[in-house]
Image: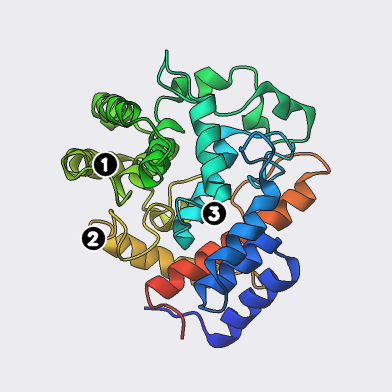
Amino acid sequence: MKRLTQECFQRARSFVEKVGREVDRRMLAFDLGEGSADDVVDALSAYQNSDGGFGRALEGDLRADVSSVITTTVAFQYLRRVGAPSDNATVRRGIQYLLDTYDEGSGVWPIIPPEVCNAPHAPWWNYDGIEERFEGFKLNPAAEALGYLLDYPNDVPATLLTVLTETVLARIDSKQDKLDMFDLACSIRLAETASLPENARATLIPRIEAAADNVVDRNPEKWSSFSAKPVSLAESPESLLAPTLDADIQRNLDYEIDHQGADGAWIPYWTWEGDAWQQAERDWKGHLTVNMLRTLRAFDRIG
């Protein structure tokens, strides 16, 4: 079992502190017990728009300022990690944005608005054909967004939570053998929601485990390209899939330690054309490095 040396850890930390975005620098400080949740939320609020949603390239492949549901779910990943309270203004405005953008007739959230095309973006975020590519948004982002409504239910109608929970569970049940890596990730985040009713969690777990067996890529030769790496779906020993993926996770952690960049960062496994990619790549490297350090610490892989 390999461990990240202190020298390599310090190199990663230095990269984040010198190159990473403020929100990621503060997230790393929080993870290391050197910063507060308020510090992270304050930095995150810089990405929040007047409509309550988040944009401004918090999701690195969407460089538009305009709010989107996908970027708002990224913001709530930060908020969940630091345990932001439900009465926080940033949280409440974000929840209201999710309520305002929910399409009750179809039971989904459109993942991006057409305005994202007015700024540089990765080709998979082209608005034309987006609904078809994301299979009607039925799980990505609906399953994850539901989890955040459950996290912060104060302003959410109870009937909406009940109906949407039943709807999302039925969708997962109907396509459990056909979930892609992003649908699976959204479903896992829902299942790991602390306030999810236990009967719903009990229903979800076997379906997620069955889907993961088909989705997780166990071949190290593919981990440098587009693939569902074990640690991307189980970031700590407390993660839902950690017990069933333990051997794969341990191999993946060895791989990640071996593939830290010379600058101390971990790099995205994707790229796209255009001048904006240079800044997007820097943003992603800082974000991914914070996440990797958190995962390595969680699995006691830092010397």
Callout 1, which amino acid?
Ile
Q: Quadrant of residue 289?
A: bottom right
Per the image, the residue denoted by label 1 is: 208
The CA distance from mark 1 to mark 3 is 24 Å
Q: Residue at x 61, y 66 (%)?
A: 39
Q: Assign a secondary structure to mark 1.
A: helix
x and y, in percent, of residue 33 in the image: 51, 78
Q: How many marks?
A: 3
Q: Can residue 140 be seen by looking at this rendering?
A: no
Whether tag 3 and tag 2 are in contact, CB under 8 A, the answer is no
Q: Quadrant of the N terminus?
A: bottom left
Indicate which disc residue 281 carries: none
> How many other residues sit within 10 Å of disc 3, few (<14), some (14-19) or many (≥20)?
some
- Name the residue nearer the viewer: 30 or 111: 30
Q: Is residue 254 above or below residue 56?
A: below
- Specify whether 198 is left or right of 25: left
Choose between 224 and 275: the one closer to the eye: 275
Q: Is residue 72 above or below residue 284?
A: above
- Identify the residue under disc 3: 224
Q: Residues within 10 Å of mark 2 (few under 14, many from 20)?
A: few
Answer whether labels 1 and 2 touch (C-beta < 8 Å).
no
* Residue 240 seen: yes
Q: Amino acid at mark 3?
A: Ser
> Residue drawn at (35%, 40%), measured in percent from left and top?
187
Residue under numbered circle 2 = 243
> CA gap, disc 3 to disc 2?
24 Å
Counting residues from the start of the chain, the first of labels 3 and 2 encountered is 3
Which residue is the extreme one toward the top?
105
- Helix, strand or loop status at disc 2: loop
Q: With 290 as the anchor, is 67 left or right in this view?
A: right
* Disc with the residue nearer the chain's start (1 vs 2): 1
